Structures are given as structure tokens and as C-alpha cells.
Image (spheres, rainbow, N blue to C red):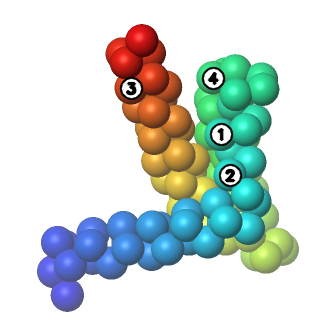
Amino acid sequence: MNKEDLIINECEELKNLLIKKNKDYENSYDKTLDEYGKQIGLIRIEDKLNRLKNLILSEEEMRTEESIIDTVFDIAGYAVLFSIYLKEKQDINNAK
């Protein structure tokens, strides 16, 4: 498989994961940002970055069910959700 196909596969997997989790959590990401502000988007990503750092530096992955790849996917997912949230808010503000 070439790099382009790998990118397409990863994005498809991430898309499916985000759609499933968004349904399971009933769009809680947007609700949390609406309630507490945009800083929560940064905090969620930073929490996952800290988790990734700990997994890599301490080799904790061997002792937990959460893998490095799972954590990287979570970071990518939060980045996508945050981007969508910001774009939706921008569209709302531009429409006023």
C-alpha cells in the first residue's frame, strides 16, 4: 500500500470512530465547549498530549489497555472536533 492509500485508510478509520463516539456521547464535546469555553478544546488535546508523553517516556503502554496509537487517534479526533466547532461558531458569527 502506498502512502496515499494509508492516509485515506487512517482518515476513514478516524471518521468512523468520531461518528460513533459522537453518537455515543450525544455530542458532549460541543456541549462542553459551549458551557465552559474554547479553552476546553485546548485542555482536552493537552491532556491527551500529556498521556502520549507518559506512554512513550515510561513505556506504560505495556501495562495499560490504551495504546500509543489509540492516544494519537484521540488527539487527531479532538483536533478535528475542535476545528469543526470553531468553524461552526465562525459561521454563526459571520451570519449575524
The amino acid on which the numbered mark 3 sits, given as a three-letter code, is: Asp
- Earlier in the chain: of badge 1 and badge 4, it is 1
The amino acid on which the numbered mark 4 sits, given as a three-letter code, is: Lys
The amino acid on which the numbered mark 1 sits, given as a three-letter code, is: Asp
Farthest residue toward the bottom?
A: 1
Q: CA distance from mark 2 to mark 4?
A: 15 Å
- Earlier in the chain: of badge 3 and badge 4, it is 4
Q: Secondary structure at mark 3?
A: helix
Q: Secondary structure at mark 1?
A: helix
Q: Secondary structure at mark 4?
A: loop
Q: Which label belongs to residue 30?
A: 1
* Identity of the residue drawn at 78% across and 64% down: 60
Q: Position of residue 49 (x, y in %)?
A: 63, 43
Residue 43 appears in the figure: no
Farthest residue toward the right?
A: 63
Report which residue position mark 4 lands on.
38
- Earlier in the chain: of badge 3 and badge 2, it is 2
* Identity of the residue drawn at 15% across and 80% down: 2
Instruction: Indicate left or right for 17 with 26 as reference.
Output: left
Contact between labelled residues 4 and 1, with CB atoms less than 8 Å apart: no
The amino acid on which the numbered mark 2 sits, given as a three-letter code, is: Asn
Q: CA distance from mark 3 to mark 4?
A: 16 Å
